[in-house]
Image (spheres, rainbow, N blue to C red):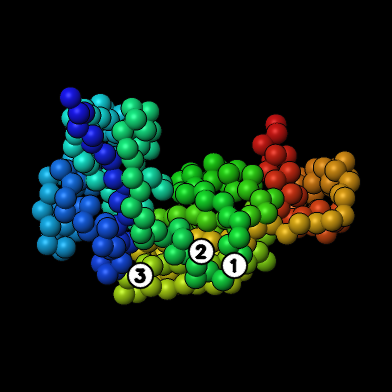
Amino acid sequence: MTRIQGRLQVVATPIGNLGDLGARAREALSRADAVVAEDTRRTRTLLSALGLSRPLISLHTHNESQRVPQLLARLGAGETLALVSDAGTPLLSDPGYELVRAAAAADIPVEAIPGPSALTAALACAGLPVNRFCFEGFVAAKERERRAQLARLAGEPRTLVFFEAPHRIAAMLADLAAALGPERHAAVARELTKTHETVYRGTLGELAARAAQEESFRRGELTVVVAGAPQRDSAVDEALLRRTVQLLARELPPGRAAALAAQLTGASRADAYALVLQHVKEP
């Protein structure tokens, strides 16, 4: 007896402009036995705009583990399920990883139907190197954790890409400028593919200042692209750097201490700042 083969289709949906939905994606959504969605209300609105109507199943951060067995059973029974997020390509800072992993482990075909992605769209228009990049998703919401996370990335030579919420973008850019240096080049892509699409380019210092001053900067969906750390050929005396940081950190704010330590020792400002943060944490 031939086994009925179900399949899971990971479908990218528009991040703003409905015209970006591909023909394969439309067909997959129209033929799926059910659409597995991060937010069924938003996906129902999308399907309605496309003139489609399909059964919806919610799959989000808080229910994914519990929902996977049920979805696997449906796939095992021969159904085709389309997995979508609220916008863009599923799994990129969105739910779906547990379902895809479980389906693959059960030898259920998993098919990617590529399309819109804020990650690749931002890289394409940022004007920064894209031959190598590192996607960090959303940074920590709490200030101390965010600063520590960014300090660890200060020496990363690849272009960095982040997602950020509008109410945190000003603080995040200020922390990026402090950790990576205000002179590091970056771009912030806002409302990509939508009516008010804007790409802000400049140094981290300049962008942090604009975010703090301009209300329109702090609206909509935001993707931050930051140039990687410049590579230095000359060796740095680590002992001298540590001693310099210890002395300066006692008297100066972290950003100023790091800048002076970098000038005095030839180290990168990013490395000096990471050491300053370590020193501040020490009792």
Report the disc number at residue 128. 1
Q: Give the side of residue 215 with respect to residue 156, left or right.
A: left
Q: Residue furthest front?
A: 1
Characterize the local packing of mark 2: few (<14), some (14-19) or many (20 or more) Cα atoms within 10 angstroms.
many
Ranked by sequence position, the earlier of labels 1 and 3 is 1
Instruction: Please state which amino acid type lies under the numbered disc 3.
Output: Thr
Ranked by sequence position, the earlier of labels 3 and 2 is 2
Residue occupying the point 36% across, 60% down: 116
Instruction: Give whichever of 85, 165 is nearer the camera.
Output: 85
Instruction: Give whichever of 12, 153 is nearer the camera.
Output: 12
Residue 83 visible somewhere in the drawing: yes
Q: Is residue 61 above or below residue 201?
A: above
User: Residue 185's image quarter?
Assistant: bottom right
Task: Give the quarter of the figure containing the N terminus.
Answer: top left
In this figure, which residue is indicated by the disc labeled 3?
Answer: 193
Q: Give the side of residue 152 with respect to residue 4, left or right.
A: right
Label 3: which secondary element: loop
In this figure, which residue is indicated by the disc labeled 2?
Answer: 123
Residue 203, percent from left and from top: 61, 69
Q: Is residue 218 above or below residue 110?
A: below
Instruction: Give whichever of 221, 11 is nearer the camera.
Output: 11
Task: Give the quarter of the figure containing the C terminus.
Answer: top right
Instruction: Please state which amino acid type lies under the numbered disc 2.
Output: Leu
